[in-house]
Structure formats: structure tokens, C-alpha cells
Image (cartoon, grey):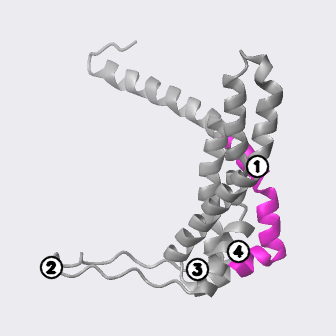
Amino acid sequence: MSRRLLAAALAGLLLALPQVAGAQTKPPAQKPAPKAAPIPAAPTISPNHLNLAREVMLNSGIARSFDSIIPAFGDQIRQQAVTRPELTKDLGEVLTSLEPELELQKQRMIDTAARIYASKLTEGELQEIATFFRSPAGKRYVETQPQVLDEMVQAMQTWTQDVSEYVMVRVRAEMGKRGHQMQ
């Protein structure tokens, strides 16, 4: 499960990359807003803006991370019931009967994600990103994403181990120069 979560986190990072294909970032504000200033109301999101955000979210492949979460809940329940084999058949039927409800739950998360995209990106930016994901390069990007994520997770595991060992060797060497012995 932790590998799936790491892959989902990496997916979020990789999904930011296509924004370079058209969206521009704004420089940070120079001065903070005065404390007495009223908090502006959240901007209204038009139906087209929200539809574009949903399209970007779906076409980017991020919904795949939602697809793996719900079956994991069923797997956890099955694992907990492993000591009660008499429940296996009924539990399987119950979990199957819940699939339409769980699909609605997934759709709620998709709607939430679309609203988040719409709140962070303008309609014009979303249009440019949607155009990218409709393009052959965008489709290829999404198609290769699972393999890229798997390889990145593996590379990160190796890198983490290597850097951890490197840091410990360097810290020991530097502490040794200062007269401290570390194990």
C-alpha cells in the first residue's frame, strides 16, 4: 500500500509538468495584504471552467489513483476476515453489491478534485492544459505515466538508501575531525 501512496504522490508531481506546456506561473505577491482588509469572496466558477477542470483531471490520469484506493479497502476487510473463512462468500457478495455506492464515492472525489483544479487554474490555463492532454504527446504522457511512476518509485528507494548512507558516512567523518566518535 505504501508503494501505491508514493506512486500517487509522484503522480501529483508529474501532473504539474504539463503546465509548462502552456500555463505561466505568477510571481509571489510582494506585500502581504493589510490585516484590516476584508477577505474576498471565493471566485465563482463557471460551469465551463469546472468542466475543463474535470476534463484535465480525468485526462491527466490522476483518477487512476482513486481507482486503486477503493479496492484496497475491500482487500483490507478481506484480510481482517481471513480468520473467518465462513464469511468469504458472503463478504465477497457484499463487497460486490457495494460497488455502485463506492463508484459514487469515487465520483465525489473526482468532483472535489475538479473543483480544486478550477480554484487553482484559470479557465484559459485549463483550456491550454486540456489541449495538451488531447494532443498525441499528452496522450502518450498519460499512457507512459504508470511505468514512469513505477521506475521513479524504485529509483527513489535506491536513491533514499544511497543518500542516507552517504550522509551518515559524511557526518561520521566530520564528527571524527572534531574528536567525536559515532557508531
- Can residue 22 be spotted in the picture? no
Q: Identify the disc placed on residue 36.
A: 2
Q: Disc 1 marks which residue?
A: 99
Q: Quadrant of residue 93?
A: top right
Q: What percent of the width, then of the height, locates residue 169?
A: 46, 23
- Give the CA distance from mark 1 to mark 3: 37 Å
Q: Identify the disc placed on residue 23.
A: 3
Q: Is residue 159 above or below residue 10?
A: above
Front one among 125 and 165: 125
Crowding near the residue tagged with mark 2, few <14, some 14–19, many ≥20 C-alpha atoms within 10 Å: few
Q: Main secondary structure of the magenta part?
A: helix
Q: Identify the disc placed on residue 55.
A: 4
Q: Could you say whether the residue bearing mark 3 is in a helix, strand or loop?
A: loop
Residue at (66%, 80%) from the top-left corner? 52
Q: Nearer the viewer, mark 1 or mark 2?
A: 1
Q: What percent of the width, then of the height, locates residue 73?
A: 67, 38
Label 2 is placed on what type of residue?
Ala
Q: Could you say whether the residue bearing mark 2 is in a helix, strand or loop?
A: loop
**Is 130 on the left or on the right of 6, as rendered?**
right
Residue 156 covered by magenta stretch: no
Magenta residues, start to end: 130-154
- Give the CA distance from mark 3 to mark 2: 33 Å
- Give the CA distance from mark 1 to mark 2: 50 Å
Q: What percent of the width, then of the height, locates residue 146?
A: 77, 51
Front one among 108 and 150: 108
